[in-house]
Amino acid sequence: MSIDLNGKTCVVTGSAKSIGLGVAEMYASLGAQVAMIDLNPEVVSQAERMAKAGRAVRGYVVDITDRNAVFACFEDITKNLGKVFALANVAGAVDQQAFTEITPERLDKMNRININGSIWCSQAALQTMKTLHDGRIINFASKSGKTGSAIMAAYSGAKGAIISITHAMAFELAKDNIKVNCLCPGITDATGVWSSVSKGYTENLKLSREEVLKKFTSKIPLGRLTDIKDVVDFVMFLTVSGEYCTGQAFNITGGREMH
């Protein structure tokens, strides 16, 4: 079964650049009415670019850790674009430090952005999604949320929480015909996260960027980093198909993660 997105409202957080932007462009190309949310003001110009091309797209500059601001944003989305059918919680943040160097401030930041932000956006979307008795919520975790990553304990913990929260949401929202899943990408090329992580590894492991790339690519059975398109394609599947799929944490790692 395939869902027609024409006239349906889809929301994407973290959509000024990278994966979030790719997801927003995919939704727009399939005829959806798209709300793009990001703390980066560039989200507005990206939305305007897509709107000039004839797409029904609006951009919103919002701090997703501010629950009141999130709910106000979704009220505007409903007023101007319609009831939310799909939400892709792409927005997130990464941090690197030795476990003994984790501070309350850095831990709080990881949790507020990665966990709280996804919860607030989901709560706001559900206000209208439930009335449709149909919907999709796609959370973003990480390979690090399953097996953890060295010098990334705070990030790994936050992403692990997203996986468990996804399971709980899926159980609770099944009665409303709302499917909730999450994606666990591996190292994704051409993203801000990989840029930040690779820089951290060059500093912490004392390796060149080329050596870092070789080190991590060698661990992937399919022999390359995850591509943005790999992730966008999975979001598309979970949105327009996947009718019998909920509560799953899908690996997009080229075989690096297999459970």
Image (cartoon, grey):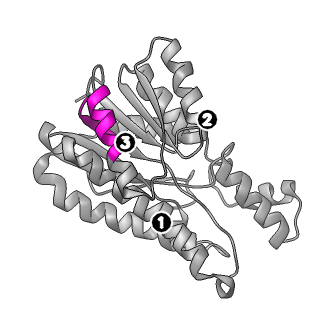
- Secondary element at tag 2: helix
Q: Is residue 35 magenta?
A: no
The answer to whether the residues at label 3 and label 1 have Cβ atoms under 8 Å apart is no
| Position of residue 6 measured from the top left corner of the image (x, y, whole percent) | 29, 19
Q: How dense is the environment of label 1, judged by Cα within 10 Å: few (below 14), some, or many (20 and up)?
A: some
- Residue 250 is at least partly visible in this image: yes
Q: Which mark is residue 112?
A: 1
- Alpha carbons under labels 3 and 1: distance apart: 18 Å
- Alpha carbons under labels 3 and 2: distance apart: 17 Å
| Position of residue 109 measured from the top left corner of the image (x, y, whole percent) | 55, 68
Using the image as rendered, state which of residue 192 and residue 234 is in the foreground.
Answer: 192
Using the image as rendered, state which of residue 257 and residue 233 is in the foreground.
Answer: 233
- Alpha carbons under labels 2 and 1: distance apart: 22 Å
**Above-or-below relation of 185 to 155:** above
**Amino acid type indicated by mark 1:** Arg
Q: Quadrant of the N terminus?
A: top left
The total of numbered circles placed on residues is 3
- Secondary element at tag 1: helix
Q: Which mark is residue 42?
A: 2
Q: Earlier in the sequence, mark 2 or mark 1?
A: 2
State which quadrant residue 250 falls in.
bottom left
Extreme-bottom residue of the structure:
100
State which quadrant residue 99 falls in.
bottom right
Q: Earlier in the sequence, mark 3 or mark 1?
A: 3
* Image position of 228 (left or right of 26): right
Q: What span is in magenta? A: 72-87
**Amino acid type indicated by mark 2:** Glu
Q: Which residue is mark 3?
A: 73
Q: Earlier in the sequence, mark 3 or mark 2?
A: 2
| Position of residue 157 measured from the top left corner of the image (x, y, whole percent) | 50, 74
